[in-house]
Amino acid sequence: EIVMTQSPATLSVSPGERATLSCRVSQSVSSNLAWYQQKPGQAPRLLIYDASTRATGIPARFSGSGSGTEFTLTISSLQSEDFAVYYCQQYNNWPPLTFGGGTNVEIK
Amino acid sequence: EVQLVESGGGLVQPGGSLRLSCAASGFTFSSYAMTWVRQAPGKGLEWVSGISGSGDNTFHADSVKGRFTTSRDNSKNTLYLQMNSLRAEDTAVYYCAKDRDRGLSLNFDYWGQGTLVTVSS
């Protein structure tokens, strides 16, 4: 089973600042990686798929990069609605599909 | 508008059974693979199972294999998760989600609101 490690566990950022989230994978998943945002009490929302393609309706301030075993989600200028938990998910080697443990982006 | 509405959650004793349903609308249900993902209280996301658009192929996480069965009724636009031999560690919010692409992308663009399953005596 592929293990996904997200860092940091918590990221404290001021509104307007840049946030950089990391996802490391135990073996190469090529570009078969997605990012989701989840707010309290809500379902996850797809942000990025294929490592760098924004999903429909996702603002341009969200960008994804990386391939193989190291991936990054960047939020260029944090808005109030961006404070949430972010998860990466690989879909290269399955079953099972696997998720990272999440990064909580909180207001500094 | 795509909508996914889960139902069937509740309190069940260890060893008991429950069937979750996910009613879909707003898209051609039979053309898309579907998945179940769960989230234990205060924890992260865990993939539970997936099913092809036709229903011919199903896949389950090792943690539920042999206890959970995933199925779909394309005539009713409904996805199911039959959960047997439930354990305390199955306590979670269960989400159904739609595959983003007809060609099986294995990433999920629409999710239901979730239904809570609590396994406790």
Image (tube, coloured by chain):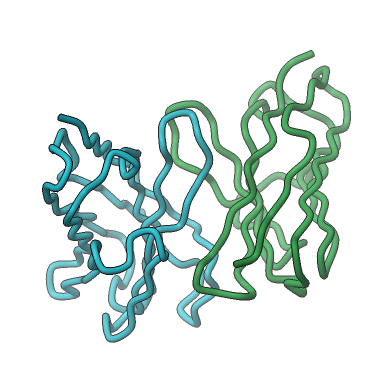
- Residue toward you, B59 or B52: B59
Q: Position of residue B107 (x, y in %)?
A: 54, 64
Q: Position of residue B16 (x, y in %)?
A: 11, 47
Question: In the picture, which chain is cyan?
Answer: B
Q: Is residue B6 left or right of residue A76?
A: left
Where the C terminus of chain B falls, by quadrant?
top left
Q: Is residue A72 left or right of residue B81?
A: right
Q: Height in image: B13 above or below B110?
A: above
Which quadrant of the view contains residue B119? top left
Q: Height in image: B6 above or below A15?
A: below
The structure residue drawn at horizontal position 18% and vertical position 45%, both measured from the top left corner, is B7
The structure residue drawn at horizontal position 79% and vertical position 20%, both measured from the top left corner, is A12
Where the N terminus of chain B falls, by quadrant?
bottom left
Q: Position of residue B33 (x, y in %)?
A: 38, 73
Question: In the picture, which chain is green?
Answer: A
Q: Is residue B85 left or right of residue B88?
A: left
- Residue toward you, A26 or A44: A26
- Residue toward you, A61 or B40: B40
Q: Height in image: B82 above or below B32?
A: above
Q: Position of residue B46 (x, y in %)?
A: 47, 51
Q: How many marks?
A: 0
Which quadrant of the view contains residue B77? bottom left
The structure residue drawn at horizontal position 54% and vertical position 46%, both measured from the top left corner, is A45
The structure residue drawn at horizontal position 66% and vertical position 58%, both measured from the top left corner, is A3
